[in-house]
Image (cartoon, rainbow, N blue to C red):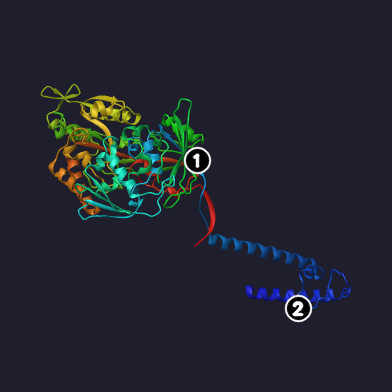
Amino acid sequence: MNLSSFFHRLRDFIFTRWNQLKNFLNSRNPLKQGSSVFLFKEKFPSFRQILKLHKVLSRKEQVLILCFLILFVASLTIEASRFYLRHVTLAPSEGGIYTEGLIGAPRFINPLFSMASDVDSDITALVFSGLLRFKPEEGYVPDLAESYEISDDKKIYTFHLRNNIKWHDGVPFSIDDIIFTIKAIQNGEYASPLAKSFLGVTVEKVDEKTVRFHLPESYIGFKDALTTGILPEHIWLKISPRASYLAEFNLKPIGTGPFRFKSFTRDKNGEIKSYTLERNKYFYNKKPYLDKIVFRFYPNSKAALAALKNGEIDGINFLPQGEILDQERNILYYPLMLPQYSAIFLNIRNEILKDKNIRQALVYATDKEKILKEVLGGKGQILHAPIPRGFVGFYGEAKKYNFDLVTAETILDKAGWKKQDNWRKKNDTNLEITLAAVDKAEQSHLAEIIKKDWESIGIKVKLQIVPSSEIQKIIIKPRLYDALIYGEIFGSESDLLPYWHSSQTEDPGLNLSGFSNALVDKYLEELRKIDNVLERTKKLIAIQDILVEEVPAIFLYSPTYIYPVSKKIKGIEVQKIIIPRDRFASIENWFIRQKRVWKK
């Protein structure tokens, strides 16, 4: 029986019983006043009359009708639910608090000084805004600025401000705040670490909504400097530069960012234990969903991890290498890529390491696979050149020195370094190398692996493990090492000039190998004037070809930055960061609560 035939039969059945009901009701004293049954004159019975239908139905018919009604109601409910689900969706809703653990304590929630500390930098990024904002998946986007232009020679940057920007205290934002901030950075009395980024830069007020920067020479990386948070002139103009380090506004800042300072707590020793930010009601852009962000501070990663496991906090700023939280089912682990590489920098000013043969033997005798597995737990990527996958200039076809002890020994033999009593010598000179590293579990373990590998080919290795607080002063600044295990971050534009240009071989430069090559210098200088990605990539590949061939360093790995956060925090989509604070690049999209809304 098809559906149409079924409904026709159902209709005939209903009208037959309808007539029976009408006759039954009309026969039951229809004229008696107050009777519960009324004369059935209408074509269709009333609701009260329908309730008498059971008097003319058989038991079987009553059961069938009841089943039909149940099926009808169930079908109607299902269809209504389907309609609702098709036209309604879950969307983020305002509310909720995110609590994160940080190692250390805040001192300067101030763009002029915050870059020296990850804790300060993290909080400053949420409280203050720059003309530009770096979003890992989009690059540099306007923030306080509505739009901007860069001159063809890359020496003039012009910015047009948004309307209706207010400071957290309600005071209107102005061009004068920008000019004040840049001049404060350039003022030696403030001793801001950012001063180098604005060396020789002049800033002018074009009109009430336009500001212009003039650079002494082209520099494509200047956009990064313009992410620096702007200070409120009406607050800081009253504070002398020499007293700026002591100002209470370093801990109770006034900014324009998506979150504003609310409060902090101290313990009985005066140390800050927690720091609370709340949503900025004056924020000029998309307002965050979260009501508050609370930071709690711990002396070390062990204490922070314990707090995360106990549910005291919702996340920590990073998961240290070697730590495991797999048993915590309510935690998600966000693997973030960093423009960072760890390497063994070979000081080629050393007489022994001037010999390229020795440098090549050392790289062949370095087991990168073992290092990645044992030191990083496999969380990272092996490198053969300085730029990791996912960043401008990555060079997957770079020459590879795969782990090969036989080749390493052959190179040394041919170069005249012969084994005598298991150690290599040449003209009564012992082949000895001092390997320096920071006194941290990761680097100490790494140094032990390298020592074992190099000694297996007859090179005597002395380890020099130095506290992180002293490595700059006693090792890096005077360049007192043969080989140094160290990491470098090269930024979003893959600017390698600070690390490989010949002008950076002495402190405070970061050319830790003392490497000098005229062609590499030329390419590095040209890169600072090129913003086309394809052209930049070609230059970067050419530079890496030379570095890999000359082996001034043994590139080891790029670590994966693991960011553990509670599953209750949704909307985290970042995949790569330039510096740790970039994990908050899309903080306005994070949410805890949800609501149902009609689909558009």
Classify residue 71 as left or right of residue 230: right
Looking at the image, how many numbered discs can be counted on the residues?
A: 2
Residue 410, quarter of the rendered image:
top left
From the top left corner, tell me how far across and down residue 591 is, in percent: 48, 48
Residue name at image x 80 percent, y 73 percent: 21
The CA distance from mark 2 to mark 1 is 66 Å
From the top left corner, tell me how far across and down residue 155 is, in percent: 21, 51
- Foreground of the two, 462 or 139: 139
From the top left corner, tell me how far across and down residue 372 is, in percent: 32, 37
* Residue 564 seen in render: yes
Local SS, label 2: loop
Mark 2 or mark 1: name the one nearer the start of the chain. Answer: 2
Determine whether 25 is above or below 457 in the image.
below
- Foreground of the two, 445 or 368: 445
Q: Amino acid at mark 1?
A: Arg
Classify residue 298 as left or right of residue 390: right
As drawn, the residue found furthest toward the front would be: 238
Mark 1 neighbour class, 10 Å CA radius: few under 14, some 14 to 19, many 20 or more: few
Which mark, residue 329?
1
From the top left corner, tell me how far across and down residue 325 is, in percent: 45, 36
Residue name at image x 53 percent, y 51 percent: 594
* Residue 2 seen in render: no
Determine whether 550 is above or below 17 in the image.
above
Mark 2 neighbour class, 10 Å CA radius: few under 14, some 14 to 19, many 20 or more: few
Mark 2 highlights which residue? 43
Local SS, label 1: loop
State the quadrant of the N terminus.
bottom right
Q: Amino acid at mark 2?
A: Lys
Which mark, residue 305?
none
